[in-house]
Amino acid sequence: MFGWGRSGVTKKRANQIARMLAHIKHGMRTKTYKEFSESFSNPGSEPDPTSQSRNEAHFVMRFSRKCWYDAKAAFGPTEGRPFINLQGQGDDFGVFITADPFSMGATADLRLESGQIAGRDAQAVVRALQAMPDWKSFADVERLLSGLI
């Protein structure tokens, strides 16, 4: 009745993910790699020399004890264009989000290896994200690239 329960939780989390992704994009557009990695790295998990040479920052976004996302922000140019990847863990296991820091929205879908089982909230979070303006599924992107949309 009041949006509580699993549906309310997953919609709230999807909104938090979208806001956090916007914050990451803004940081990538306005900060140098060094400034970004200093402000986004989890304490004690600063980039190692390999990540530094690739201009990558890895950090964890924790939403609850049972739900977190492993994040990767790559600035380029050593690895091509800048990008952001978020991989859901725990209740959101299998959610995979990718975004260009210089464009609107993002792409969200389930990404599981053979035999893996999605987290209990993963499908609902993906549906909530794909319902947001400028968010797409990987199938939408493939249709767009092939000229079908």
Image (cartoon, rainbow, N blue to C red):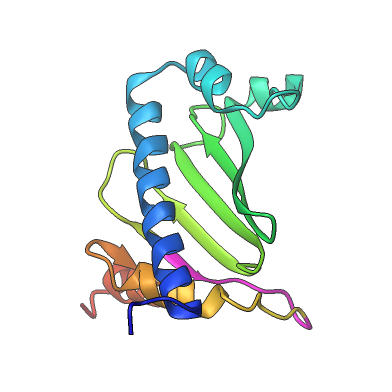
Quadrant hosting residue 38: top right
19 up-or-down from 87: above or below = above
- In percent of width and height, residue 37 lies at 56, 22
Is 36 part of what is drawn in magenta?
A: no
Q: Is residue 138 visible?
A: no
Is 110 part of what is drawn in magenta?
A: yes
80 up-or-down from 53: above or below = below
Left-right relation of 55 to 103: right
Residue furthest out toward the right: 115
Left-right relation of 107 to 86: left
Q: Residue at x 24, y 61 (%)?
A: 134
Left-right relation of 89 to 103: right
Q: Residue at x 41, y 73 (%)?
A: 8
- In percent of width and height, residue 133 lies at 22, 64
Q: Is residue 61 visible?
A: yes
Left-right relation of 22 to 13: left
Which range of residues does the magenta coloring cover?
Answer: 108-115
Quadrant hosting residue 121: bottom right
128 up-or-down from 24: above or below = below
- In percent of width and height, residue 101 lies at 36, 39
